[in-house]
Amino acid sequence: MCTILIAYGMLADHPLVVLANRDEYYERPTLSAGYWEDHPEIYAGRDLIGGGTWMGVTTGGRFAAVTNYREPAAAGMRSRGELVAEFLKSNVDCNQFLRSIEGRADEYSPFNLLVGDLSPDRRSLQYFSNRSSDPVVLSSGIYGLSNHLLDTPWPKVANGKEHLTAMIVDGGLDRTRSFEILADETQADDSNLPSTGISYDAEKALSAIFIKTPGYGTRCSTVLSFDNDGSWEFEEKVFV
């Protein structure tokens, strides 16, 4: 998962709206979003190598998603998708969960993790990265996350937040418009490209919200919205 755009506490009828693209190697075996046979309360895609997921929800109103933090030289022993699955399987509050993984965060490759509980009596959304410090409790607002820390103003993050904000101002959640935001293939100008230790060509290709390269790119787009009672609607478009 490489681009996540969030509207939290910005709409009266949808306390959380998430627009997300999952970017991955095309050859990595994956299941599309659905209820898990071994944990039927979880609705998510599934990585068939690591066993976890990049983004998911539960029937009880929990949400989690992960992106990698781009640091080519760093590699952990465990799949980052385990963290999403672990939170969705648990019933502890968001902060307790994030505190519980701080001591073993270096077992994973660099990551950004979002966890939320949208049930009415526990509503919370929090963020943690093993490339920053303490977990962060998010207040109402528009957020963007890619492959650096939360709200790092990479062009695709800044552009995505701008488009999401405009949609919210124009009247709220529009699923057709949401998928159009996620389909943006505009690449950053050279003067605004991040510098993360990869080649120019790779940096350029990965600077778009929707990525297309011969072996790697956006494999699915997801629009997720929660209602005030913790129920949700999860729509996924799969491309590869």
Image (cartoon, rainbow, N blue to C red):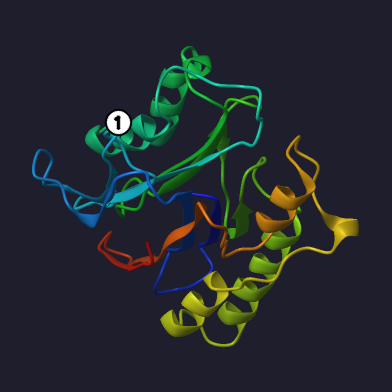
Counting the numbered discs, the total is 1
Query: Which residue appears at 40% of the width and 26% of the height?
Result: 96
Q: Which residue is mark 1?
A: 86
User: Residue 17 vs residue 7: left or right?
Assistant: left
**Quadrant in which the C terminus appears:** bottom left
Q: Residue furthest right?
A: 191
Q: Mark 1 Cα within 10 Å, few/some/many (few <14, many 20+)?
A: some
The local secondary structure at tag 1 comes to helix
The type of residue carrying mark 1 is Glu
Foreground: 38 or 59?
A: 38
Foreground: 101 or 123?
A: 101
User: Residue 182 vs residue 133: left or right?
Assistant: left
Looking at the image, residue 126 lies above or below residue 131 = below
Measured as percent of width and height from the top left, residue 107 is found at 47, 15
Quadrant position of residue 183: bottom right
User: Residue 240 vs residue 143: left or right?
Assistant: left
